[in-house]
């Protein structure tokens, strides 16, 4: 079976406001982390939400040979997990309860799966992420960073074929940024497809296999980090003067010197 994710001629947005218009991407494969980058309003979150089925869309969406173009939200959640930028604030569930709930309501859940099974699986994920010590804390009493880690646990506990992460590191300190991206990398290596929205270009360069640079709802360039991050691309898309240099580990580093001067 074809195990790739294919997105072709894809359009999405809001009533009276289309964000993405006839967008097509190269096929994505298990084991691959794809970073979506671009300035605010480029369409990154819109693309993730529309793939997840949270926004109406038109076009071709194939996952593992299944046509999900017209699939309901419930059908898509059989194969796709989406981590939003932030959890809703008034959630009184504990971290453990939220993770267990995500697992128990999954369409993939077996009738033989018990609360004990869900508890064990959830604790395994919380241990892996490093937040088992706050398993019994309520979500509405956590810091922003802790809530992001709890949200990540809910996204990966079902072991989806496609994991969509919308700015998973935005509220995290340096250690937890690296921890999350390392977990994302490991999750992809387990045979899953991952798409992650990132604003930190150096995180994207270090941890992703493929980068898609969006601008005004269209693909400006897509390729390896070295292909996608060049001074010219950064100048055109972000309007900054930047250098891109190799690091000792073989990835590239983005160094921004300042805003690009506007020509009069």
Image (spheres, helix red, strand yellow):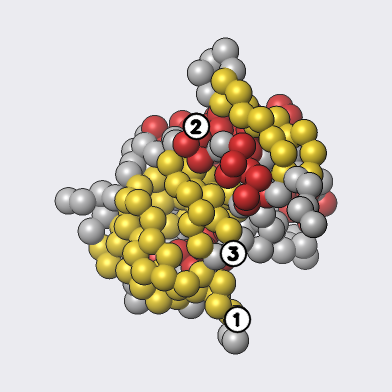
Q: Which residue is mark 2?
A: 226
Asked which quadrant contains residue 232, the reply is top right
Count of number-bearing discs: 3
Q: What residue is at 77 percent from the left and 52 percent from the top?
A: 262
Q: Which residue is mark 3?
A: 216
Q: Nearer the viewer, mark 1 or mark 2?
A: 2
Circles 1 and 3, Cβ within 8 Å, touching? The answer is no
Q: What residue is at 43 percent from the left and 65 percent from the top?
A: 23
Image: 231 above or below 92 = above
The C terminus appears in which quarter of the rendering? Answer: bottom right
Q: Earlier in the sequence, mark 1 or mark 3?
A: 1
Q: Position of residue 4 (x, y in %)?
A: 29, 50
Say the numbered circle drawn on residue 17. Answer: 1
Q: Earlier in the sequence, mark 1 or mark 2?
A: 1
Q: Nearer the viewer, mark 1 or mark 3?
A: 3
Q: CA distance from mark 1 to mark 2?
A: 33 Å
Identify the element where label 2 is drawn: helix
Q: What residue is at 58 percent from the left and 49 percent from the top?
A: 37
Q: Give the camera-side residue of 261 and 164.
A: 261
Q: Residue furthest bottom?
A: 16
Q: What residue is at 66 percent from the left and 63 percent from the top?
A: 41
Q: CA distance from mark 1 to mark 3?
A: 12 Å
Q: Position of residue 151 (x, y in %)?
A: 63, 50
Say the numbered circle drawn on residue 31. Answer: none
Identify the element where label 3 is drawn: loop
Q: Position of residue 21 (x, y in %)?
A: 47, 72
Q: Is residue 238 left or right of residue 143?
A: left
Q: Position of residue 230 (x, y in %)?
A: 56, 36
Q: Is residue 64 left or right of residue 215?
A: left
- Is residue 220 visible to the viewer in this orientation of the structure? yes
């Amino acid at each position: 079976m074809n195990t790739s994710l294919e997105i072709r001629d894809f359009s999405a947005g809001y009533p009276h406001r289309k964000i993405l218009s006839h967008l097509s991407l190269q096929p994505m494969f298990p084991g691959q982390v794809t970073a979506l980058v671009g300035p605010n309003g480029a369409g990154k979150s819109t693309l993730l939400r529309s793939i997840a089925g949270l926004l109406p869309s038109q076009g071709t969406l194939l996952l593992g040979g299944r046509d999900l173009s017209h699939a309901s939200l419930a059908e898509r959640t059989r194969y796709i997990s989406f981590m939003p930028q932030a959890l809703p604030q008034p959630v009184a569930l504990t971290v453990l309860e939220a993770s267990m709930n995500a697992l128990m309501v999954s369409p993939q859940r077996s009738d033989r799966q018990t609360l004990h099974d869900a508890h064990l699986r959830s604790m395994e994920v919380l241990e892996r992420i490093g937040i088992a010590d706050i398993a019994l804390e309520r979500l509405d009493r956590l810091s922003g960073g802790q809530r992001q880690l709890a949200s990540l646990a809910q996204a990966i506990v079902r072991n989806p074929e496609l994991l969509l992460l919308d700015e998973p590191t935005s509220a995290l300190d340096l250690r937890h940024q690296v921890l999350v991206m390392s977990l994302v990398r490991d999750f992809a290596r387990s045979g899953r497809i991952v798409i992650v929205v990132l604003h930190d270009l150096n995180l994207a360069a270090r941890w992703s296999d493929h980068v898609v640079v969006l601008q005004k709802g269209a693909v400006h360039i897509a390729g390896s980090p070295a292909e996608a991050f060049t001074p010219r691309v950064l100048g055109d898309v972000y309007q900054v003067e930047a250098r891109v240099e190799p690091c000792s580990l073989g990835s590239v580093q983005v160094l921004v010197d300042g805003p690009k001067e506007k020509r009069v």
